[in-house]
């Protein structure tokens, strides 16, 4: 059985060599400030959902971060997350069948099922560049899971950008086939490449500046 996630598929599409180092060789990626900030914000929102007062939730989330993050910044970002304590489910896990023996694992930040069968799927983002997020298939795939795993008859997805408070909504009346095809094809390509390093070539781009494996990559491949 092959299990993939949206982030794995997306990383493979962006740079196969980074994917190889992270998921085939299983090299740990060191914590980074943006990653730890994002985790702290999500932890604080989840604690708030479970009834912890916001100030205390932020303090606990910041204390648990692997790198120092600003409590004031986390508090400001959490304030823009429109969570309603106790309503729906946060960190809702799913396994969506993509093909025979191929599954997509995911974790929905917040899902609320309404009486009319509509699922409202929310993902909180701490990204500074909203366009980079909006062009991906993440919430299309989560919408497919809402139909097929959570039993929704209609789905509304929402990216909530907590830096600006901007909300991008999209409505679906059926699972988005284009996104499912993208996931299936990408997963099949990963499986086909096997585990040999030479099958995962680097793909240089703006994202290299945030890559923890850059030195290793340049030493082996140089700039190509
Ligand atoms: S430095 Fe760039 S090309 Fe090399 S592994 Fe990292 S993301 Fe890929």
Image (cartoon, rainbow, N blue to C red):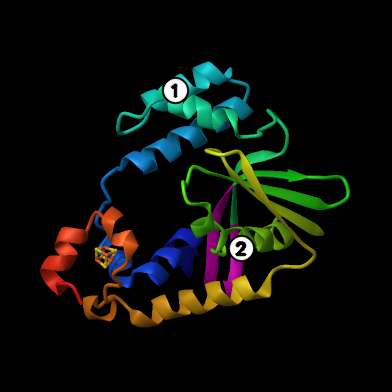
Answer whether residue 107 is magenta in the image. yes
Percent x, y of residue 121: 68, 49
Answer whether residue 94 is magenta in the image. no
Task: Tell me, yes or no, if residue 152 can be seen here.
Answer: no
Height in image: 179 above or below 78? Answer: below
Which residue is rendered at x = 24% and y = 78% of the image?
196
Height in image: 38 above or below 133? Answer: above
Height in image: 148 above or below 43? Answer: below
Position of 107 with respect to 84 (left or right) is left
- Image mark for residue 72: 1
Position of 161 with respect to 28 (left or right) is right
Q: Quadrant of the C terminus?
A: bottom left
Query: What stretch of residues is rendered in magenta?
Result: 95-108
Q: Secondary structure at mark 1?
A: helix
Q: Splitting the image into 4 quarters, where does residue 223 fall?
A: bottom left
Q: Which residue does the numbered mark 2 point to in the structure image?
A: 141
In front of the other: label 1 or label 2? 1
Q: Earlier in the sequence, mark 1 or mark 2?
A: 1
Task: Tell me, yes or no, if residue 45 can be seen here.
Answer: yes
Which residue is rendered at x = 66% and y = 60% of the image?
145
């Amino acid at each position: 059985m092959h299990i993939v996630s949206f982030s794995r598929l997306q990383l493979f599409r962006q740079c196969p060599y980074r994917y190889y180092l992270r998921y085939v060789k299983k090299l740990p990626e060191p914590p980074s400030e943006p990653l730890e900030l994002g985790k702290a914000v999500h932890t604080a929102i989840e604690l708030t959902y479970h009834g912890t007062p916001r100030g205390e939730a932020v303090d606990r989330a910041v204390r648990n971060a692997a790198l120092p993050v600003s409590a004031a910044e986390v508090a400001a970002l959490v304030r823009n997350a429109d969570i309603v304590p106790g309503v729906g489910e946060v960190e809702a896990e799913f396994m969506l069948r993509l093909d025979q023996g191929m599954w997509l694992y995911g974790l929905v930040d917040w899902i609320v099922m309404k009486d009319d069968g509509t699922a409202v799927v929310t993902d909180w983002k701490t990204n500074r560049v909203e366009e980079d997020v909006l062009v991906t298939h993440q919430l299309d795939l989560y919408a497919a899971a809402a139909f097929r795993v959570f039993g929704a008859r209609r789905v509304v997805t929402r990216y909530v950008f907590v830096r600006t408070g901007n909300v991008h909504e999209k409505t679906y009346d059926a699972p988005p086939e284009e996104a499912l095809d993208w996931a299936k094809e990408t997963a099949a390509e990963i499986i086909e490449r096997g585990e040999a390093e030479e099958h995962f070539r680097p793909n240089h781009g703006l994202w290299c500046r945030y890559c923890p494996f850059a030195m290793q990559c340049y030493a082996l491949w140089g700039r190509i």
